Amino acid sequence: MPKAILVVICTMALLLNHSARVAGLNLSLADPLMALVLLLLAAMRQLIIPVFVLLFFFLVVVVSGITAMFVTPGLFGVYPDLSTLSDLVKLVVALLYIICGVGIARLGVHISALRWYAIGASLVALLSVVAEFGGRFLPDSMYYAGFRFRGFMVDPNYWAVLAASAIAFVIWDRGLRKWARFGMVLCLMASILLSGSKTGLITLAVLAVVLIFERMRRSEGSVGFNVFLLMAVVALALLWQPIMTVVAQAISEGSTTFPQLSRISILVEDPSGAISESGSARGDAWGSGLAMIGTSPWVGVGLGTYQAVNEAMFGEATVAHNTYIQIAAEWGLPLGVLFFGWLASLLLRASMRERSTVGDILVVRNMVITFLAGSFSLSLNNARMFWLFLGILIFLVLDRARNSTGADPSHRLFEPALSDGGAPAFRDLSRGSGPA
């Protein structure tokens, strides 16, 4: 593979750390490079697409489009407008990033791409730390409400979840020197704190639990590690209250210098109130989304109508701030359950014991999990890096399930036996019709 193609792929991954809202669309500097990568994959006869992904995409577009045009006007008095076209574009972009992820994994350069994604996030994080102690020299556009760091993203919570996914990779990556990994993780964690994101900290906690369980799986025969872990859990349970008191006091004192900490103090003081206080109104947003699902559970409210329907019902045009509720409300429960059920099965297959030694599968799985954890408080269904990671994971899981011999996996990708139902799981778009 020419080095120029690798440079384009890694640059695209690096630029995933940028996002901007333009004319109602979340755009990224990575988008034109993603299109270039797809063209290069086609030129190299490496452009492939999972058939089941393509079929599901068309199913979502047809059902949600018909709902927006014919069902939602009757139920809610809301008619489709340019927002419907905007949401269709977002779905197409998500599909293209999945295809791009599959192609990158097939070329075998996914680790290089993810490394540059993590390096980019770490550099932005380092910038936030230097600016915090160096007189806040960064432009106002890199902060939300004047003090919450969001980097080059549209939202500080979005940035925090992105940083957590970068941590998942950096911890695993043995291609980086230990001192570099340590410094990158510290910068990323500090940047999450500087974002003032409760969602980011919760996502980081979920990642920590996943890594601990993975370490336990690898250490089943190690009595010493299991005893140490048991003692640590018991000690943490016994000392939980004193520890939380000290942490709360430290956060309270630190918030005078770093106001971002005042937003996350509620996680320690009153976790149950974190969804509705300190500038967060997640409870109300979730409630309105669930109400939409209750009103139209089978087909949802359709493409591009969520905010308008929310305004018609509750007087406020807002998103669900929860990917699961947002998708179920837009697509309907059947399609939402089908999608997340399939996604859960993919993660389980990535975690199967017989493939537990395949490290790249596990690290991509963990990066997907970080976004799924953040999805409980954010609407991340338009997060392009999530769909890129998902495409990579699809290739790694489905292909290596049939290629455990260590041979070159690419030639096996088109075998009809790869699909559980006997149909080809992937279609080669560069070789005409039918599986190659």
Image: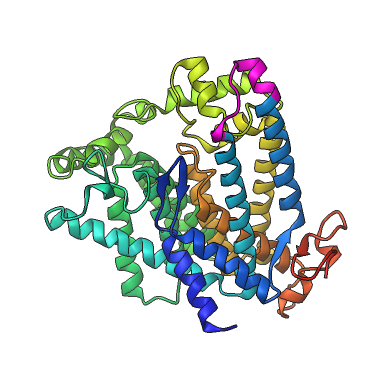
Task: Give the colour scheme of this rendering.
Answer: rainbow
Q: Is residue 154 visible?
A: yes
Q: Main secondary structure of the magenta part?
A: helix
Q: Residue at x 80, y 68 (%)?
A: 414
How far across and how far down the image is residue 207, in percent?
46, 52
Q: Residue at x 43, y 52 (%)?
A: 208
Q: Is residue 73 magenta?
A: yes
Q: Residue at x 64, y 30 (%)?
A: 302
Is residue 246 left or right of 347 when viewed as pictured? left
How far across and how far down the image is residue 315, in percent?
45, 16
Count of marks overlaid on the render: 0
Judged from this view, the residue extending furthest toward the bottom is 2
Does residue 318 lie above or below 381 as drawn? above
When asked about the image quadrant of residue 103, the answer is bottom right
When asked about the image quadrant of residue 14, the answer is bottom left
How far across and how far down the image is residue 75, in percent?
65, 16
Q: Is residue 351 visible?
A: no
Which residues are drawn in magenta? 70-83
Is residue 432 left or right of 187 when viewed as pictured? right
Q: Nearer the viewer, residue 318 or 242?
A: 318
On the rendered image, what quadrant is the N terminus found in?
bottom right
Q: Is residue 122 magenta?
A: no
Does residue 414 lie above or below 98 as drawn? below
When asked about the image quadrant of residue 116, the answer is bottom left
Is residue 384 left or right of 167 when viewed as pictured? right
How far across and how far down the image is residue 100, in percent?
60, 63
Does residue 287 lie above or below 274 as drawn? above
Is residue 101 left or right of 201 when viewed as pictured? right
On the rendered image, what quadrant is the C terminus found in?
bottom right
Judged from this view, the residue extending furthest toward the right is 422
Q: Residue at x 59, y 51 (%)?
A: 94
